[in-house]
Amino acid sequence: VKDLTTARLHLRANQKNDADALARLWSDPEVTRFAGGPRNYEHVRALVEGGAASAGEYRWTVVDRQTGEVFGECGLIHKVVESRPETELIYYLFPNAWGRGIATEAAGAALAFAEKELGLVRLIALVDPSHEASRRVAIKLGFRSQGVIRRGNAARELFLRESV
Ligand SMILES: CC(C)(COP(=O)(O)OP(=O)(O)OC[C@H]1O[C@@H](n2cnc3c(N)ncnc32)[C@H](O)[C@@H]1OP(=O)(O)O)[C@@H](O)C(=O)NCCC(=O)NCCS
């Protein structure tokens, strides 16, 4: 997985060294409030340490270029949605990083990589319909709402970005 750089951020392919930070991210109740709730810290830590990336998936640790502080994670993952295989753009930040345009900047770089370097012409985002901040990020990145679908027990707004 290639590293990416933006004005403020470094997106580095997840490393074993990032296991603690990413496990803290995914076990944080505030971070996961609109995304299925906290995952088990040890489980996530072991996954990252094991380098368990699936083929064709990309996960980057989002880091402050200046200080090296870990802001969160973004990535491109595979999901079957409404019986169709899709690539989902995901973005998750620690609360202290919210409200500064970081998600849009990080996810924008992942999106550009997906389109320009992987040649993907169709990306989705799945967002809790009441999660306004995440909906805003998707919309700012050029995704359009396709309406609300059911995913297991949860309602999710399906956002789609198609480029030709
Ligand atoms: C969603 C999340 C990624 C947004 O990160 P961020 O860096 O704050 O996002 P940005 O600053 O790039 O953009 C957020 C936008 O939402 C807006 N916003 C934030 N909170 C809002 C709220 N409660 N209601 C309405 N709009 C809100 C901001 O004003 C901004 O829009 P603007 O640029 O038009 O002003 C971040 O809150 C997060 O990591 N949450 C936990 C993980 C998560 O839920 N990820 C998404 C799963 S689908």
Image: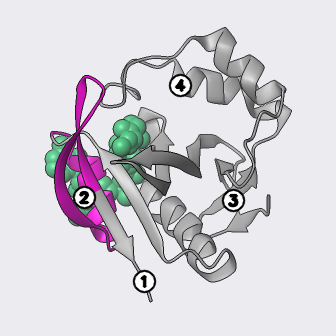
Q: Which residue is mark 3?
A: 10
Apparent side of residue 9 relative to residue 159 in the rendered image (left or right):
right
* Secondary element type, mark 1: loop
Q: Which residue is mark 1?
A: 163
| Rendered residue at 20%/62% (across/down) | 145
Q: Which residue is mark 2?
A: 136
- Disc nearest the viewer among 3 and 4: 4
- Disc nearest the viewer among 2 and 3: 2
* Secondary element type, mark 3: strand
Magenta stretch bounds = 130-158
Q: Amino acid at mark 3?
A: His
Would you say residue 132 sits in the magenta stretch?
yes
Q: Is residue 65 visible?
A: no
Say if 99 sits above or below 128 in the image: below
Q: Amino acid at mark 2?
A: Arg
Whole-angstrom CA distance, mark 4 to mark 1, is 31 Å
Decide if ligand 1 comes within 8 Å of the CB at mark 2.
yes
Q: Position of residue 56 (x, y in %)?
A: 71, 55
- Image quadrant for the N terminus? bottom right
Label 4 crowd (10 A; few <14 / some 14-19 / many >=20): many
